[in-house]
Amino acid sequence: MKRLYFSIILGCIILVSACASSKDSYKVVNLSTNNGEKETTTGFQYMLPKTLIAVEVEVEKNEFEKGVYAEFATSLLGLSDVPSNNNAKYSIRNINISSIAEPDPKNVYFVDLGNSGLNLDICPSGILKSVNKKERTEVQSKSFHHKEEQIFAVKEQEGFADILLQPKKEMPKRKIFIQTDSSIQELPMLPTRKDSDKSAEAKAKEAADLIMSLQKKRISLISGEFEEQYNPEALQFLYDKLNALEKQYLSLFIGKNKTSTSKKIFYVDAANLTFNNGKSDVSLASFSENKGIETNESGLQGDIVLHINNLNTLALLSENQKKSEKKTVSEGFVYRIPEMVEVSLNYKDISVSKKMPVAQLGKTMSLPNKKMKIVLDPETGALQEAKIIKK
């Protein structure tokens, strides 16, 4: 009878233990090596990140736009050697190297929750951030615009000179008055255009006459031929206005320059590269002063080359991992230990170099299959915190 009671009590202890164990049990399955098959539908799917090396090249474009009346510059204004063709010159202003993270399709995992009641915090992209962490941390992931940005740094000024180039359109009448020492004077304004159906030569003649008129007004202002005496501030204001108007009209004959800057971003996945003695070179694009950046779609070698040097910081870990893999098999959460690389790019007088972790060049490791508090770096998948939760 005593043996029977002892057997019943022992069985109850084993049953309670098994229930407690099954309550906290879960299993992490690698879908990338399991043909994407899930053993159950009760669970979550997460991914580890991979690193893309981002190379941002900032290009400046100096563009000359010939004057619409360039052919009349000599006959109407007596100007010589006026450019008659449009042209543009490009130059590289700056190069920046950084990294961004995106989900790695080769590292997709399914967490079979069972009855464990795990609490997973996963990014919208599917990258795991934490397990059983009470407070959620908002992660501001580094990102770039995947489309080429066009940023105009200097825009050509539009003013009274553009009136002559517009279609039929009446300009609103506007007057500007300025305070002098003894009275209020009206600032000389250019007449509005009433007829746009004129030949190019007639319009050029009109612009040339306005230039001559502005020059005379400016000379009169400097020489003091106006009836009223202006204070120094008013005199400077009038002079600057007349000078600006003359330059705008003059650009119709001699042309104008405008400068803009644009950014082109290249993304490199180090996992797709071939390393020779830990080094790999990537030809990103070609550059010329006349054409700017040209991508190497044909596979030809360009002069913008990215150099990647694998620092091989995980060599010792690789040997130890091979030994441990033969002894133990874990079904816990998988994380990354990223490899460090040095990335550099040299172009003429621009030189940039940066060390950074690259997730997919590193190793994947598994944690014990226990109820734990786990925090991962969403940029690399590296383990930031791991703590077994005591019952």
Image: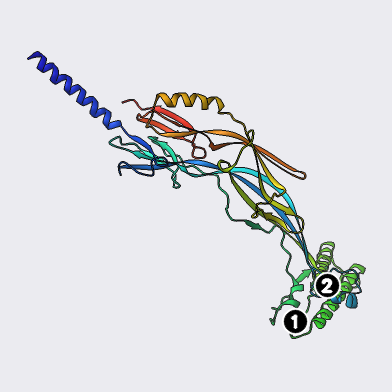
Whether 254 is drawn above or below 323: the answer is below
User: Looking at the figure, which quarter contains the C terminus?
Assistant: top left
Horizontal side of 160 relative to 268 (left or right) equals: right
| Location of mark 2 (residue) | 253
Q: Nearer the viewer, residue 252 or 342?
A: 342
Whether 352 is drawn above or below 237: the answer is above
Q: In the image, which is nearer the foreground, mark 2 or mark 1? A: 2
Residue at screen point 58% across, 49% down: 144
Can residue 180 be seen at all in this image of the molecule?
A: no
Residue at screen point 45% across, 47% down: 125
User: Looking at the figure, which quarter contains the N terminus?
Assistant: top left
Circle nearer the N terminus (2, 1): 1
| Location of mark 1 (residue) | 193
Q: Nearer the viewer, residue 19 or 252?
A: 19
Q: Amino acid at mark 1?
A: Arg
Residue 227: x and y in percent read: 88, 74
Can residue 259 be seen at all in this image of the molecule?
A: yes
Q: Residues within 10 Å of mark 2 (few under 14, many from 20)?
A: many
